[in-house]
């Protein structure tokens, strides 16, 4: 984690997916320095430029949200779900076979993964920093607009950021991430 609780878009570095079929930029992971096999939770963005399979993550649940670009139909365990930038976050088990079929241009998505028994909830809407969940381990917000000197797609750790910053983010359009368990 960062000392300020701010994970800036400008600091992201994209690397190959676990299965080599695309690129991802890890934003935050717990515990710090964990790899794909040892994280408790992981937050990343990915560029999906071609149709194809997603990496399998046994014992992991995922929440995926399209941020910008085209749409895709995500087939998970034989069930199809259309995802686009206007849609809500979509939860699915990471150990089921999953594949994307793009409907046009490449897209950028936001991915939250938690190793069971942890639970992740991602909500799109205005940030209410005072809303707390039971057994909350982590609370983060991906900005969907520029606010308080921060840029769209910066991620804020609401538990680590200065309370004055968190207060100025109240009402901002975000993806509100809660990890509990």
Image (spheres, rainbow, N blue to C red):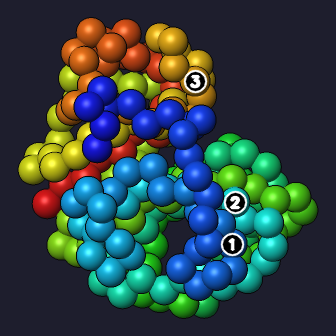
Left or right of 71 in this view: 5: left
Lower sequence index among marks 2 and 3: 2
Mark 2 neighbour density, 10 Å: few (under 14) some (14–19) many (20 or more):
some
Q: Is residue 9 visible?
A: yes
Image quarter for residue 102?
bottom right
Q: Secondary structure at mark 1?
A: loop
Q: Quadrant of the C terminus?
A: bottom left
- Determine whether label 1 and label 2 are within 8 Å by CB: yes
Instruction: Estimate the spatial distance between the alpha carbons at disc 2 and disc 3, rounded to whole Å.
Output: 19 Å
| Residue pointed to by mark 3 | 151
Left or right of 39 in this view: 109: right
| Residue pointed to by mark 1 | 22
Lower sequence index among marks 3 and 1: 1
| Residue pointed to by mark 2 | 47
Return the residue nearer the eye: 34 or 126. Answer: 34
- The percent position of residue 31, horizontal first and vertical second, equals 22, 60
Q: Secondary structure at mark 3?
A: loop
Mark 3 neighbour density, 10 Å: few (under 14) some (14–19) many (20 or more):
some
Left or right of 104 in this view: 98: left
Lower sequence index among marks 1 and 2: 1
Q: Secondary structure at mark 2?
A: strand
Return the residue nearer the eye: 131 or 164. Answer: 164
Q: Residue at x 31, y 37 (%)?
A: 2
* 113, above or below 56, in the image: above
Return the residue nearer the eye: 176 or 45. Answer: 45
Q: Residue at x 33, y 57 (%)?
A: 29
Count numbered badges in the picture. 3
Image quarter for residue 107?
bottom right
Instruction: Estimate the spatial distance between the alpha carbons at disc 1 and disc 2, rounded to whole Å.
Output: 7 Å
Q: Residue at x 22, y 15 (%)?
A: 163
Q: Is residue 79 visible?
A: no
């Amino acid at each position: 984690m960062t000392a300020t609780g701010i994970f800036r878009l400008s600091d992201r570095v994209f690397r190959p997916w676990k299965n080599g079929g695309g690129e991802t930029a890890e934003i935050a992971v717990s515990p710090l320095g964990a790899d794909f096999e040892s994280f408790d939770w992981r937050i990343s963005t990915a560029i999906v430029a071609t149709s194809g399979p997603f990496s399998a993550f046994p014992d992991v649940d995922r929440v995926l949200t399209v941020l910008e670009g085209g749409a895709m139909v995500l087939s998970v365990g034989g069930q199809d779900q259309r995802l686009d930038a206007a849609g809500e976050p979509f939860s699915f088990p990471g150990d089921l076979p999953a594949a994307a079929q793009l409907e046009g241009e490449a897209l950028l998505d936001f991915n939250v993964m938690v190793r069971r028994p942890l639970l992740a909830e991602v909500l799109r809407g205005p940030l209410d920093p005072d809303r707390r969940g039971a057994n909350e381990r982590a609370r983060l917000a991906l900005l969907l607009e520029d606010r308080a000197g921060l840029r769209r797609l910066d991620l804020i750790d609401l538990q680590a950021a200065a309370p004055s910053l968190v207060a100025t983010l109240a009402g901002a359009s975000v993806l509100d991430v809660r990890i509990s368990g």
